[in-house]
Amino acid sequence: MVNTEKFIERLKNILDYYELTAASFADKIDIQRSSISHLLSGRNKPSLDFVMKVVKNFEEVDLYWLLNGKGKFPNVTESIPPTLFQNKANDKAVENTTDSTEIEKIVVFYKNGTFKSYLP
């Protein structure tokens, strides 16, 4: 059973981390704004559908942490400095100057907020 009070605290941590209002958070995970309001006030308990939408839309949120408070948030395994930046002006890849010429990892970021990393 999920401790609703602690769950609400973790949900507020997520909102703070992503600098989202309750309304923008609801829009992002595609639920009614009133649902977030009811959850944050303690009126309603989180549904499985709600929890899964949070985990699906925010990769740094670990399911076990969200439900039980065990683990860490944000769930970032490692920090990798980007080696390529997208130049919005002419939509061309611009190489970042570094001392190393070997590729360590390639990370592809998608518009929906997800990403995939590839090792050579």
Image (cartoon, grey):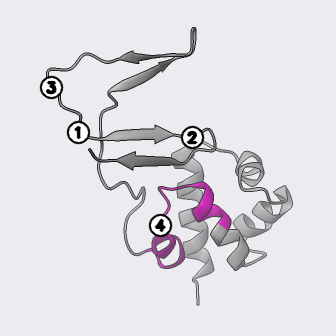
How far apart, in angstroms, are the residues tagged by discs 2 and 3? 26 Å
Q: CB under 8 Å between callouts 2 and 3?
A: no
Q: Which residues are magenta?
A: 53-69
Element at label 4: loop
Kindly give the residue lying farthest to the left in the view shown: 99
Give the quarter of the figure containing the N terminus. Answer: bottom right
Q: In the image, is residue 60 part of the stretch drawn in magenta?
A: yes
View extreme (top): residue: 89
Rate crowding at label 2 as few (under 14), some (14 to 19) or many (20 or more) other CA atoms within 10 Å.
Answer: few
Q: Which dot, 4 or 3, sits closer to the camera?
A: 3
Residue 12, located in which quarter of the rendered image?
bottom right
- Under mark 2, the amino acid is Tyr
Mark 1 and mark 3 residues within 8 Å of each other at the beta carbon: yes
Judged by depth in the image, the label closer to the viewer, 1 or 4, is 1
Amino acid carrying label 3: it is Ser
Q: Which of disc 4 and disc 1 is earlier in sequence?
A: 4
In the rendered view of the protein, which quadrant contains the C terminus? top left
Q: Tell me if I can see residue 46 in this picture.
A: no
Q: CA distance from mark 1 to mark 4?
A: 26 Å
Q: At which x and y percent is residue 28?
A: 72, 49
User: Looking at numbered disc 1 in the image, what kind of residue is underneath it?
Assistant: Glu
Q: Which mark is residue 104?
A: 1
How many marks on residues? 4
Mark 4 or mark 2: whose residue is earlier in sequence: 4
> In this view of the protein, which residue sits in the foreground, 102 or 43?
102
Magenta region's main secondary structure? Answer: helix
The reply, left or right, for residue 9 in relation to residue 99 is right
Task: Say which residue label 3 marks.
Answer: 100
- Which residue is denoted by mark 4 in the rendering? 62
Mark sitting on residue 110: 2
